[in-house]
Image (cartoon, coloured by chain):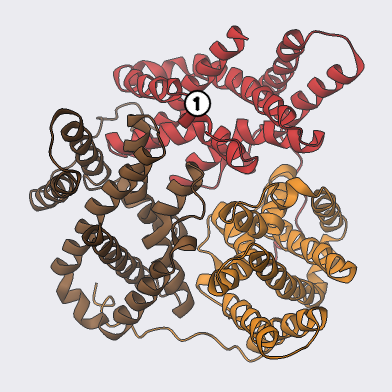
Chain colours: A orange, B brown, C red
Amino acid sequence: MNIIYAIDILGTFAFAISGALVALDKKLDVFGVIIIAFVTAVGGGMLRDILIDAHPINWIGDLNYLYTIFMAVVVTFLFKSKISHLSKTMFLFDTVGLGVFTLLGLKKGISYNLQPIIALIMGMISAVFGGVLRDVLTNKIPLIFEKEIYASACLVGGFTYMLINKLTEVPENINFIIASAVVIIIRVVAVKFHLELPKIKNDVFTKK
Amino acid sequence: MNIIYAIDILGTFAFAISGALVALDKKLDVFGVIIIAFVTAVGGGMLRDILIDAHPINWIGDLNYLYTIFMAVVVTFLFKSKISHLSKTMFLFDTVGLGVFTLLGLKKGISYNLQPIIALIMGMISAVFGGVLRDVLTNKIPLIFEKEIYASACLVGGFTYMLINKLTEVPENINFIIASAVVIIIRVVAVKFHLELPKIKNDVFTKK
Amino acid sequence: MNIIYAIDILGTFAFAISGALVALDKKLDVFGVIIIAFVTAVGGGMLRDILIDAHPINWIGDLNYLYTIFMAVVVTFLFKSKISHLSKTMFLFDTVGLGVFTLLGLKKGISYNLQPIIALIMGMISAVFGGVLRDVLTNKIPLIFEKEIYASACLVGGFTYMLINKLTEVPENINFIIASAVVIIIRVVAVKFHLELPKIKNDVFTKK
């Protein structure tokens, strides 16, 4: 399971940088940057653990998350001018984190004997809620509600995992990687081709 | 208790539609609409259960909430042009939900041996917090802080229940219905006659 | 420990008034004012208790918090025109509350056998999260992310407590007072001399 733990930390790192960048953009002070980075990186797992009563919750039970976030903030401060040129790298990190967080959350849900659909939702919450918190705290409408097939990618990836698990003999670690890849590929393809979930033509409200 | 469970589901359905309508108005995508509907419908009970440590929390312990919300979103999509003409029906649903959620939350609080005033607050939280979350996530000042005698109706209704329970021999189910009716009537009357809670004339801040 | 409990109540009172004043400024109705006062006063301890699974959480386990908040709202309503002239007094109350809440949260964390750094964070959360909630609910970017060495003062004060505790034989109550004083002094000095945490010169985003 060491590889998965390593990717977990890498995902935390990427999410923390993404939070720190938004906070910088909002001209928050050093402390605000740390908080937003923290919330973005561990917010999803934290909500999941509160909802399923898994104590100690993620960042309380493992200090490595805190250290990782702190390093991510330092890196953001040091290389902020470079990071903007690295947006593709960042996007990749963030997307890898998305895939891994989804599967980690899903597996934690399963290990708590939750119903499959609930476990699936826990996977999604783990992956996306940090970003929601980041946006609420910086006073924006959460990104996932407006753009990007973000949360949907998590659901499809999580569902893939459960399907493979049910129907085949594929070892769990391999399945983990396949399903993470599904999340990652969907998101990359969606962003590349500007795919969006449909909006409902909203003739009801436009006359207001 | 079957009637109460049925009204609980009906209230969930109504709250989910109210959330979906706000999300449509904000032009969120399909996924955003589902999330906001979900949060509006189960947010109150979820917070109550987290606060009083009641696990599994509402929508994790009973999948019918999820199914109901999903159906509500589908109905909203299909009949969105009609629903605007049904605003009176929707208002009624929403108000019935408000009454029922208040009493359900209150009774859950009592069954956890909370102090009466805390149980009363739990009733109110169950009924109104979903709407608060909906508004925060769509970046508005929560409606209940600005308009409508919304939360106050819950408190009065909940108090009525406790009073009747203490002072009379009225059977619990009848009491449940009476107290729910109190919530519903207060809200209907308040909206009909544009009643508002008083604001404090605020000479302190206007000179700013 | 009675003095500390008294200061806890005093801090709750001060925080509730600070919340009520913000709510008045936003022209919320009576009920909205009570909610915001409540959330400001107990939000920090509530989040702390949820995170570390300490049930019953603060205001559920001790009704005095509710009574204190209610009295604070009444006082705000009665003396609202005076309170603006008492801004120095209010600032002092609020700052004392900040110091005490930090130390109370820290000690609770320690009593739950949390790692020192986690206990430190719990102290900070207890002290500042109420204000964050207040700002999110009234639709502002949380103040602590933009101005004031607020949260940092809590961290330094909490750290002082742990250092003294580790290295000296100073009795706990004295240590509590010293460390609270550190929080208070840092904040007072920072506000007096307009100290701010550095912001990163943000050449990356300014070209947008």
Q: What's the residue at 31%, 43% (across, down)?
A: B107
Location of residue B82 in the rendering, given as x and y in whole percent from the top left corner: 19, 81
**Residue at (78, 65) in percent of width and height:** A14
Chain label for disc 1: C
Q: Is B106 placed above or below B140 here? A: above
Task: Tell which of B178 and A72 is nearer to you.
Answer: B178
Residue at position x 87%, y 66% in the image = A6
A7 vs A78: above or below: below
The residue lying toward the viewer, choosing from C187 and B155, is B155
At a point 32% along the width and 71% down the height, the residue shown is B21
Give the x, y percent position of residue B42: 40, 59
- Residue B171, image quadrant: top left
Whether residue C95 sits left or right of residue A84 in the image: it is: left
| Kind of residue at disc 1 | Phe
Instruction: Give the residue number, with chain letter if any, for mark 1.
Output: C15
- Quadrant where the N terminus of chain A sits is bottom right
Question: Tag 1, which secondary structure?
Answer: helix
